[in-house]
Image (spheres, rainbow, N blue to C red):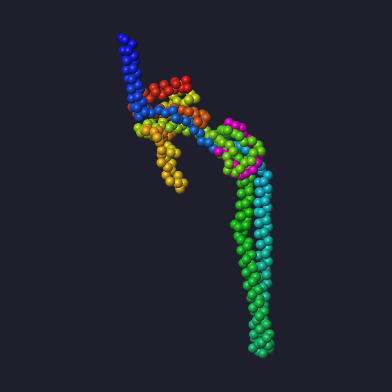
Amino acid sequence: MTPDQKFARYVRFSLIGFILVFIYYLVADMVLPVTPQARVYHPVVQISPQISGRVTSVQVNNNQSVKAGDILFSIDEGPYNLAKEQAQLALDDAKLRNKRLDTNVKALEAQISAANAKQHEQKLLKSRGEKLYTQKSISEQELESIRANFEASKANVAALEAQLAEAVLARGDSGNKNLAMRHAANQLAQAELNLSYTQVRALSDGVVANLQLLDGAYAVAGSPLLAIVAKKADLVADFREKSLSNMKQGTQARVVFDSRPGEVYDAILETFEAGVSNGQLSANGLLSTTETSNRWVRDAQRQRIHLKLANHQDLIANMPSGSRATVQLLPESTIGQWFGSAQIRFISWLHYIY
């Protein structure tokens, strides 16, 4: 066999091998989809103070495990202690004011009793005066004077009753239903709540990450100062849309983690993500933006799925957030599962190299 014949044979074998690999790639992309775009994500809780103030002490270290309720850092209590004392003074003042109003109500009630007695007396004098007038014993001027005194006594009673109604209205309900007491008690409760916020606590179990906070920093309400990586973990993988066309919830999968080369873990496809950011529209008042691309073959859109390890779910809980993985989805056929398992096993060996 001449060198040209040998070269032609090598070319034929190479073309046949390329065609076989290309056909396998096309079939595998639909039947045995695999992606290296998989990660372990942990929910990250951003810790923001609910009040503003100077940080007096940071009580955790970077990468320290914390439990829900543990104190992370403290804010200067001085201004909030003063606010609490001021609210307590306002509550005490409301109580004292109510006592003064109660005394005023009792005084007006006593004055009304005296005015009623005076009115009764003037009424009797008026009746006697009218009899004496008919008997020509007093003059008409004296009778008019008696009648005027009676009307004055009636007006005095009416005025005192109006003052009493105003005093009762100003006093309001008694006990805890009193409006002034409720307002002052609410201010005191708010001051006590703000005082409790001076100790910023963890809301969930996790690990403190990227801690940059130091004593003396000024905390602004609502501004994150540190982050806690939760123990709960989620394994997600991004596949091309057509690769998921034959897959459904409950499909078996195999997972290889970059941090654990040579180890293959069983998993199941738990859920499909509802969408990706490219498919999100916002009511921002702007006109629509069309997609522009000069490529004849555009990039395939990827969709996200969530997976659950069959027997080692606690494994990813201890992995750092962002850990890489490779996911192989398996078809229902036995032969397809065998090829898929072989393919992911080969990839797991390659992780020893890269």
Specify the quadrant that holds the N terminus.
top left
Residue at coordinates 58% horizontally, 33% vertically from top-left?
A: 210
Query: Of 313 and 106, which appears nearest the observer?
Result: 313
The residue sitting at 42% across, 28% down in the picture is 35
Give whichever of 308, 114 is nearer the camera. 308
In the image, taking residue 53 as reference, residue 265 lies left or right, namely left
Is residue 75 visible to the viewer in this orientation of the structure?
Answer: no
Res. 234 visible in picture:
yes
Image point 42% across, 37% down: which residue? 273
**Above-or-below relation of 87 to 247:** below
Q: Is residue 207 magenta?
A: no
Residues rendered magenta in the picture: 46-65
* Position in image of residue 266 (x %, y %): 42, 27
Q: Residue 64: within the magenta?
A: yes
Q: Is residue 234 left or right of residue 192?
A: left
- The extreme top residue here reads 1
The picture places residue 129, in percent across and down from the top left corner, at 66, 84
> In the image as oriented, which residue stretches furthest toward the bottom?
136
- Residue positioned 65% across, 86% down in the render: 131
> Where residue 234 sits in the image (x, y, percent)?
47, 33
Quadrant position of residue 338: top left
Number of marks in the rendered image: 0
Res. 327 image quadrant: top left
Picture coordinates of residue 204, whole percent (x, y): 55, 37
